[in-house]
Amino acid sequence: GIDLVRTGKDEFFVLEDNCRTPSGVSYMLENRELMMRMFPDLFINERILPVDDYPTRLLKTLMSLAPKKCENSEPVVVLLTPGPLNSAYYEHSFLADMMGIELVQGSDLFVNDNITYMKTTQGPERVDIIYRRVDDEYLDPLFYKKESLLGIPGIINSYKTGNVNI
């Protein structure tokens, strides 16, 4: 989705292009559920396509991106969020919950020998796919903003060596 504003009679300005990480899908899903409860006849009488399978389709798509070096029979997918102070945190939490994957922050992940791991109570768990909701410049302090606390040092090398898809 593209956020547009009208700047003149026949002029528009693109504020943001959300092609990489579209925001708002959680609100769309919740809205549809509410609408179906409030106006069930609308959905019976009209040809309205379902949207409730979005999280399943998203997870299936993410899993299809497993790196060739994936050692797990089922790839481990996580959703990387900047954290609870981010304006889209509800969306991140909602999607992770609906897909049944871990919601992580940069401090929950680490890279060792170019392999990305998630910290768990059972010890490190290898991560194969990161659905990231962190902007590029904050992703890896070794490559981008050195002061970033949102990203994971070494994640770009992990990606370059084919150990994780971001």
Image (cartoon, helix red, strand yellow):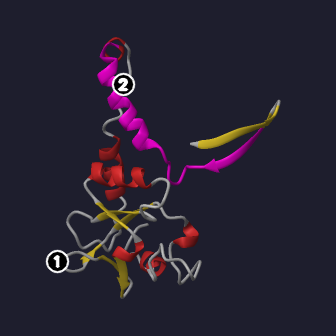
For mark 1, give the secondary structure.
loop
Report the span colored magenta: 12-41
* Residue lying furthest bottom: 113
* Relative to 161, residue 64 above or below: above
| 162 over 4 or under it: above or below | below
Residue indicated by mark 2? 35
Marks 1 and 2, the one that precedes in the sequence: 2
On the image, the x and y values in percent for residue 44 come to 30, 14
Going by the image, does 6 lie left or right of 51?
right
Compute the Cα span from label 1 to label 2.
42 Å
- Location of residue 123 by image quarter: bottom left
Please report the residue visible at 29 percent of the width from the left and 48 percent of the height from the top.
98
The picture places residue 99, in percent across and down from the top left corner, at 29, 51
Q: Hey, what amino acid is under mark 2?
A: Met
Question: Which is nearer the eye, 158 or 41?
Answer: 41
Q: What is the three-letter code of the residue carrying label 1?
A: Gln
Decide which of 99, 86 is in the foreground and name it.
Answer: 86
